[in-house]
Image (tube, rainbow, N blue to C red):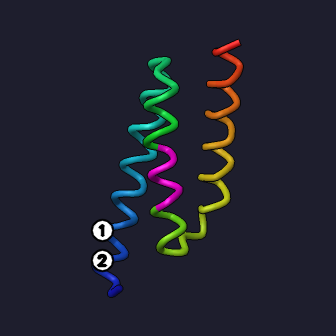
Amino acid sequence: MDSVDIGDRVREMVTRWNIGVAYEDLGDLAKAEEYINQSVQIAKSIGHPKLEYCRKGLEEVKAERHEASL
């Protein structure tokens, strides 16, 4: 990947993260998990330094979704 491709992937990662957070704020935890998971997958594929932050956010949404289902 060249730097342009990586820059595009970073923008896509951030956009998907933000969409996920918006869905979380709206209470649609399934959609939030879907978009945040996509962000994590992109971060992993490009070796982004915020990968662990993204993974933690995904785990928090999963836990929140689990609690809401009880």
Provide the residue span drawn in magenta: 36-41
Q: Is residue 63 left or right of residue 1?
A: right
Q: Amino acid at mark 1?
A: Asp
Instruction: Give the class, few, some or many, for how many residues have Cα within 10 Å of label 1's Cα (few <14, many ≥20).
Output: few
Task: List x then y, in percent, for residue 64.
Answer: 66, 25
Magenta stretch prevailing secondary structure: helix
Separation of marks 2 and 1 at Cα, in angstroms: 5 Å
Q: Is residue 20 left or right of residue 47?
A: left
Check if residue 64 falls in the magenta segment.
no
Name the residue rendered at 71%, 19% in the picture: 67
Name the residue rendered at 47%, 53% in the picture: 39
Q: Quarter of the image for the N terminus: give it.
A: bottom left
Q: Which mark is residue 8?
A: 1
Q: Residue at the front extreme?
A: 70
Q: Nearer the viewer, residue 59 or 14?
A: 59
Q: Residue at the bottom extreme?
A: 2
Name the residue rendered at 68%, 48% in the picture: 56
Check if residue 40 falls in the magenta segment.
yes
Q: Which residue is mark 2?
A: 5
Q: Amino acid at mark 2?
A: Asp
Q: Which mark is residue 25?
A: none
Task: List x then y, in percent, for residue 9.
Answer: 36, 67
Q: Secondary structure at mark 2?
A: helix
Task: List x then y, in percent, for residue 42.
Answer: 45, 63
- Kindly check if marks 2 and 1 are in contact, taking CB atoms under 8 A apart as contact: yes
